[in-house]
Amino acid sequence: MNETAKTLSPDYKVALAELLLQLADDDFLFAYRGSEWLGLAPHIEEDVASSSISQDSMGHAAMFYNLLEELGMGKANDLAHARPANDRKNSILLERVNGPGNYMEDAQFDWAYAVVRNYFYVQAKKVKMDSLKQSTYGPLAEVAVKVNMELYYHLLHWKTWFVQLLSTTEEAKKRMFQAIDKVMDDFGDVFSQGARGKQIMEFGLIEEESVLNRKWSAALAPVMESLGLEVPRKASSKIQDGRNGEHTEELHKALSTLGEVYNIDPVAPW
Amino acid sequence: MIAPLHLTTEEVLLLLENVKDPEIDTVSIIDLGMVEAVTVKNRHVSIKILPTFLGCPALEIIKNNIIRAVKEHPDVVEVSVEFIQSPPWTSDRIKEKGLQGLKAFGIAPPPKQMKEDGSWHIDCPYCGSAYVTMENIFGPTACRSILYCKSCKNPFEAMKPISNLM
């Protein structure tokens, strides 16, 4: 446990750990789904770019797990691999498969879905990092500053794809519209802070859900407008909230693939 | 009687000049501006390092290379290496020697500054021409981009600019 962590009140620590798990689990799954595209992306430059983004994002997840380790919440590796699906706090959006099939064979992944999910998620992450720069927990604010610098390139990348695919053929547009609907169906819990959201906000760890959501819409507005489109709205009813450990079968499968080596030998060096 | 040797910070910094980027042997971690602090206390050395990118897989290798290099000094009992995020590493931390070392390896150094619209300018590290195109902002490692020189017809890499303005 670090020196800062020792001085925190128990309530503050509980709220902080909750937020850190949400951030860590989001990027952990985001990086995994991104890495499944390796070798399958539309062209070789994209393979290089998207796997670089996945690598950065896994680095961000590792930073958030490390902050939890410093709080005395367990080892970063165990937090990443050993927690069952119903302990996970990631948004449902990030656990969704890339499409039918398996990345090793007969993968029929949906690039439009990848572009929309990645652009909308990275924009949401950017809004969160900007807010976290003012977090009352100093070590988290410091990490947010660093993550933001790398995020600059991720956002630029996915925004470029998003605008280009929506400015080309009718077929591309049709697929993009379908992808936008599919992503928005799962967008309900992206800004959710779960059952402890009130404490997270009261302790000044990050701004509240509605503020972040508004900032996300505002950031998206000029881009959508340039395409003659409106900012998509999320599905009205929140069916499941990943922040409270509610997940799909897709997460179970992802975790068993991701944790294969860890589960064979938890102390294997990487 | 022989006077006890006093290990100094300067001596440690000299040893760190020998710790190169694992993939670019013409630049050291000092040249790249990754070394934030070195403290020596009773022959125990602690070093604080700023990672260039958070997901960089070379970090563990760099850490081990630092420990090995510093332990070469006979007065060193223990070396600890810690990665810290604050201040964040930015590409303007790269020293003049680092800029030259990158060029010597065929990697264009990051631009000193970005324009207001976020664009930046890079010259070919081989022929110095400004007639270059960006092939991919992302490259073989997190910190590099891939470009092509239309003058000397060489593909080359460039270090990505990373700044506080991002």
Image (tube, rainbow, N blue to C red):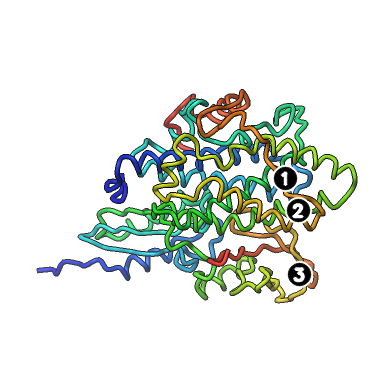
Q: Kindly report the distance in space between the C-alpha atoms of the residues bearing marks 2 and 1.
A: 9 Å
Q: Nearer the viewer, residue A210 or A270?
A: A210
Q: Nearer the viewer, residue B18 or A192?
A: A192
**Residue position marked by numbered label 3 in the rendering:** B132
Mark 1 residue element: loop
Left or right of A259, for residue A158: right
Query: Amino acid under label 2?
Result: Met
Question: Are circles 2 and 1 on residues that touch, CB within 8 Å?
Answer: yes
**Residue position marked by numbered label 2 in the rendering:** A224
- Residue depicted at x 70% and y 34%: A98
Query: Amino acid under label 1?
Result: Pro
Mark 3 residue element: strand
Crowd rating for badge 2 (residues with CA inside 10 Å; few <14, some 14–19, many 20+): some
Left or right of A173, for residue A20: left
Q: Nearer the viewer, mark 1 or mark 3?
A: 1
Residue B132 in the image: state x and y as whole percent. Answer: 76, 69
